[in-house]
Image: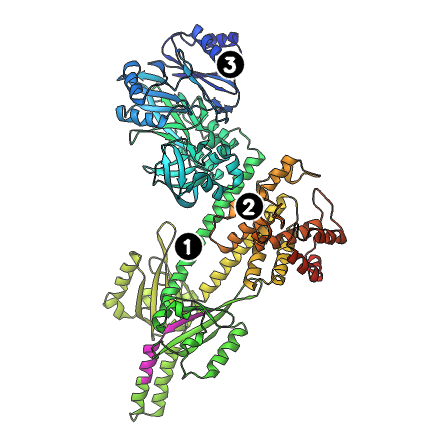
Amino acid sequence: MTLLNYNYIDFHSLKKFIGTNSIPNTNSVLIQIFYSNTDVNSVYSLREELLSILPNASLIVTSTAGTIADGSINDSGMSISFSVFESSSTKSMSYCSLSNNEIIERLSKDLITDRTKLLLLYANTFLFDSESLLKKITQEYPNIVIAGGNAGDDFKFEKCEIFSHTCNDCNVVFAAVDSDVLEVQTKFLFNWQTIGKELTITKCEGNRVYEIDNKRVIDIYSHYLGEDVVENILVHGTEFPLIFQDNGTDVGRAPIIAHEDGSLTFRGAMYCGQMVKFGYANVDFINQYNKQKLLNEMQYKNEAIYIYSCSARRSMLGTFLDEEVEIINNLAPTSGFVTYGEFFHDAKSCSNNLLNITTTYVILNEGQNNQKKLTAPKTSKTSNAKDITLKALTTLISKTSEELDGTINYLEQFRHAVDEASIFSVADKKGIIKDVNKNFEIISGYTKEELIGKPHNIVRHQDVSSEVFKDMWETIQSGKSWKGLVKNRRKDGSPYYVLSEITPIYNKDGSFKEYIGIRNDVTELEEYKHILKNELDTTNKSLEDNLNYTAQYEDAINTTTAILKTDTNNIIKYANERFCELSGYSLEKLIGKNCEELRHEKHRETQKCAKIREKLQSKQIVQEIMTNVTKDKQEFVVNNLFYPIIDLKGNIVEVLQIMYDITEIITLNEEITNTQREVVMTMGAIGETRSKETGQHVKRVAEYSYLLAKLAGLSEEDALLLKQASPMHDIGKVGIPDSILNKPGKLTFEEFETMKTHSSIGYEMLKHSNRQILQASALVARTHHEKWNGTGYPNSLEGEDIPIFGRITAVADVFDALGHDRVYKKAWELKDILNLFKQESGKHFDPNLINLFFEDLDEFLALRNQYEDA
């Protein structure tokens, strides 16, 4: 077969094109007219011209949201697709005002035969339920391939037009291709990624959804995507479709009608109880994945391809969809259109489905064994700056989230391992308990609720000298770790012994955060020592023997935690200094050694090592008392926790063996925390850099915010959190066009309205995180342009309804912005800034904060000088 495309100019040129290409006047020709931004009367005239030249050809017509021909997408004109078959015949029909059952009955009489290989279907989006018809056709004709889509109207969402050679204003048109040799393959490209929590549809009728999670669906969109999206939901809502699983396939649904009652009609049916998530386009992933998919699936050139791509996909991908269509055109000549929902035939399940947000395409070949080798897909399309920025931003979000999730997954496993192996507690600067683990509850006899808020002396035993605790406090308050044996008292009054290590933890700026206490129960060992000592006291053994035994047991009690890491074959990958001390081996000698070589031979004889391996392979946590052998053939015994480390794919990557030392864990925790803060500061600098501000701006805003927070009476913890979050106040500027962001002089009303959206953009970027620093950053991004008198944006909040973080950042941001050059203004004199602050107290700014600002003005000026631009 041959596929030819022609963009209509006039009748004379059309007639010449048909003649030059020898297009025959037979039913082997299928004509498809796709039009965009064209008066329908012109299309009617074109139809009559074609029928006057080729009256025996089949013909169908649809309005679109963009025409596709020869690898390009166009937004105006009439595109004519001529499919000239060699060994196949075609026929077209149209139907109006018929039920699905009536249409099925007519199809069996008018169109479908035993030789029908392909049935093209174009439906009127706003007048006809195409999804129900697809299900009916699947029931009656499961093996016939359905392709096509819902008609478009150039994103007006008002009225579509479809018709055939004989009928106008149709509900649905069909074109059938009958053949004994035609090969038909269906493919689709989707690759949207889900984000956020899973939601439940709680009220709907067909494709009209009223409530999600028992809230109006429009309120759900407002909550997660913001008021700006809701105000133009039919345009922006398509960029964030609802995605659900259907027979293992991700399916998207985008809104096409917004109703006054807050409900939305989607491009396909939904049902109550259906679980959905919001989706977004990771442009880089879609772009790269689609190229590789096309290259992997196609080895030879084909004869023709029909393409049907969703308008929502076009809205989000922009020029990257042009590239996608051009790559498909490398496989074969193409024609088709941008739809309001595309149809896809799944050959495996013999089902026909209405999809959204996808590109579906149908590959046609009449010739057999086409041997023209396909080269790697290439494109000549050039992405514009906006699309490149979108690609970079979605890649940044995806990669950062992926890396943080992987790191946190690994860290949580370490924390869980420590939690399993030790008695753990967290205390504030005064020693008041903030948290304990289950092991602490078990050994002390107290519940967590009984312990939190109490000092650690709740478990202090009266036999322990006060000098022990004096030494402990002096040590940890000097910034060092304290280690020692402590006798404690249970809730029932009985004693227990723990080998303790108390370590102070500091924030990145050096300020104190909390004390971490790690303890290991050595009650049995201590009691055994006392029993032995009593027995020795009753014997005639020499004092030298008594001291010898006592020293050995004291050494056992004071042994600190050791850590080993092995691969899945028990080969040592890492050992800490304490284990090196215990084993007598240097680190170089331990690396590469099978850890079972260090075990006592009795464990091998009793198959204990083999049993441990078997449990680890089944991903169980194992805790055993193990006897090991030193380099000098001496024995030492440890309470050994074996913990399998699992990656995100569920594979065991290594085994962690914990012997009471967790210094490496604490270090890892602090490094990850610092990294997270550095990411936040860097992202804040990115937002400022786009508007050509210096990195010092976000540093000054952070320092001003911290100082003002402390003056306002916020706790040290909250003040530090604001200091870390405030650099993200303008991160939303990554979504503002450069032409507006860097415009010198005053913005127009429309430009300023666009600029104001950066607050909501920043909030939407950050709000889904469950991390405290990013939640605070989202709050700052959304509220730092609100004003005390209610005239700010985006939500016109007033007075103390504005969160304190937003009120403080507003003062810090304006003070620094006015005092430095911007693209639209020169720096103000200090006296002018201070006069403005006095005038705007109680209007723009919180009057209490302004009073505090003036009371400590010298400190703010000192910070400004300290972090002045270079």
Q: Which secondary structure, mark 1?
A: helix
Residue in the image at 48% along x and 27% along y: 157
Cα–Cα span, label 3 and label 1: 59 Å
Q: Position of residue 230 (x, y in %)?
A: 50, 37
- Above or below residue 849? Residue 630 is below
Q: Which secondary structure, mark 3?
A: loop
Type of residue at label 1?
Asn
Residue in the image at 66% along x and 47% along y: 693
User: How many neighbours does mark 3 have within 10 angstroms: few (below 14), some (14-19), or many (20 or more)?
Assistant: some
Question: From where the camera sits, is residue 331 visible?
Answer: no
Q: Position of residue 588 (x, y in %)?
A: 43, 65
- Residue of label 2: 762
- Magenta residue check for 407: no
Dots 3, 1 in contact, CB < 8 A = no
The label number, if any, that marks residue 8 in the structure image: 3
The label number, if any, that marks residue 409 in the structure image: 1
Question: From where the camera sits, is residue 119 visible?
Answer: yes
Type of residue at label 2?
Gly
Q: Position of residue 694 (x, y in %)?
A: 66, 49
Dots 3, 2 in contact, CB < 8 A = no
Residue sitting nearer the eye, 629 or 85: 85
The label number, if any, that marks residue 740 in the structure image: none
Instruction: Answer with left or right where residue 99 lies relative to residue 454.
Output: left
- The disc, 3 or 1, on the residue closer to the chain's N-terminal end is 3
Cα–Cα span, label 3 and label 2: 46 Å
- Above or below residue 344? Residue 800 is below
- Magenta residue check for 521: yes
Q: Position of residue 716 (x, y in %)?
A: 56, 64
The answer to which image quadrant residue 134 occupies is top left
- Span colored in magenta: 516-530
